[in-house]
Amino acid sequence: MGSNGLLVLPGDDWAVVKLGHRGIVNSVLIDTNHFKGNFPESCQVEGCLYEGSDVATLNSKGEFPGAAWMPLVTRCKLAAHEEVEKESICTTPITHLRLTIYPDGGVSRLRAYGVPC
């Protein structure tokens, strides 16, 4: 355990999602429904503005060349079979979300609420 109460283990898993429209995300919902024994200990959500059309440029760390990931939701604890909704700390328009889970596990759903711009 780290000093912040989060599990400290090497490794993580991530997924990048392209939003339907460029927009400002107000809140994010992370759902571990149906994952009672295989849920992540914690997660974080980041966003970036990437106007390129080729997602093949995404590298093995989930980064686009020339695009910086900004935190939307700082690392937070998750629980089994539960929905967690967090307000976004970023007010910058984004086109992509990156969900990183620690160390691994299942997430049923990731929802982003906001406004297109």
Image (cartoon, rainbow, N blue to C red):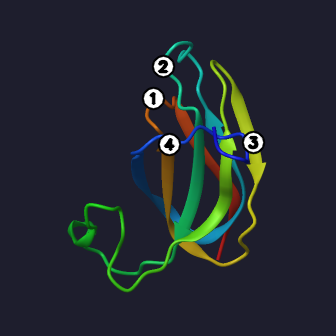
- Mark 1: give few (<14), some (14-19) or many (20+) Cα within 10 Å: some
The x and y percentages for residue 22 are 55, 72
User: SS class of the residue under badge 3?
Assistant: strand
Residue topped by disc 4: 101
Give the CA separation, mark 2 to mark 1. 5 Å
Q: Are marks 4 and 2 in contact (CB under 8 Å)?
A: no
Residue type at the position of mark 1? Gly
* Vertical order, 81 against 61 (above or below): above
Give the CA separation, mark 4 to mark 2. 12 Å
Residue type at the position of mark 3? Glu
Quarter of image, res 65: bottom left
* Vertical order, 28 against 106 (above or below): below
- Mark 2: give few (<14), some (14-19) or many (20+) Cα within 10 Å: some
Mark closest to the chain's N terminus, 2 or 3: 2
Residue topped by disc 2: 38
Q: Are marks 2 and 1 in contact (CB under 8 Å)?
A: yes
